[in-house]
Image (spheres, helix red, strand yellow):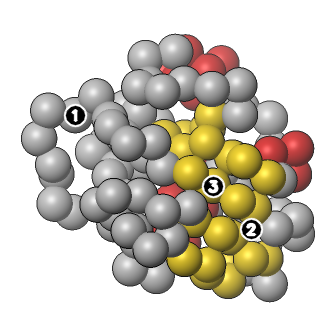
């Protein structure tokens, strides 16, 4: 199992948490399955940036992003060099520490 540490986020995960994820699982789906309600307005179809995360540890264990993800991330709020769309991250064997940015470009919550 891979341990994913989610740093505190004022709405989604105020205390921060850790979850155990099987290698090969999609990061966004893993968070949602474990009660972390990260936004995902496009239903994980790689068409928005609402599931944007910053990978603070373990970034190099993730597969390289493709051009579409890179282009979308250019529009994300709080973009950093280690930003990814969580819907495009497949968890490997290395533990991760992620931060969910304070804001998204969404004007309204999707309440998925």
Residue under label 3, please give it.
98
In which quadrant is the C terminus drawn? bottom left
Q: Residues within 10 Å of mark 3 (few under 14, many from 20)?
A: many
Q: CA distance from mark 3 to mark 2?
A: 17 Å
In terms of depth relative to the viewer, which is nearer, 8 or 19?
8
- Quarter occupied by residue 60: top right
In which quadrant is the N terminus drawn? bottom right
Residue 8, given in percent of the width and then of the height, sits at 48, 63
Q: Which mark is residue 45?
A: none
Of badges 1 and 3, nearer the viewer stands 3
| The residue positioned farthest toward the left in the image shown | 108
Q: CA distance from mark 2 to mark 1?
A: 28 Å
Residue 97, given in percent of the width and then of the height, sits at 70, 59
Residue under label 2, please give it.
24
Of badges 2 and 1, nearer the viewer stands 1
Dot 2 falls on a residue whose secondary structure is: loop
| Whether residue 51 is visible | yes
Q: Does residue 84 sit above or below 58 in this rendering?
A: above
Residue under label 1, please give it.
106
Dot 3 falls on a residue whose secondary structure is: strand
């Amino acid at each position: 199992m891979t341990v994913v540490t989610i740093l505190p986020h004022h709405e989604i995960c105020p205390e921060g948490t850790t979850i155990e994820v099987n290698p090969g699982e999609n990061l966004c789906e893993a968070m949602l399955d474990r009660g972390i309600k990260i936004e995902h307005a496009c239903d994980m179809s790689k068409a928005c940036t609402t599931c944007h995360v910053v990978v603070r540890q373990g970034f190099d264990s993730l597969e390289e992003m493709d051009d579409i993800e890179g282009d979308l991330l250019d529009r994300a709020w709080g973009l950093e060099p280690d930003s990814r769309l969580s819907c495009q991250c497949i968890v490997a064997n290395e533990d991760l520490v992620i931060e969910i940015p304070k804001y998204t470009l969404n004007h309204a919550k999707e309440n998925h």
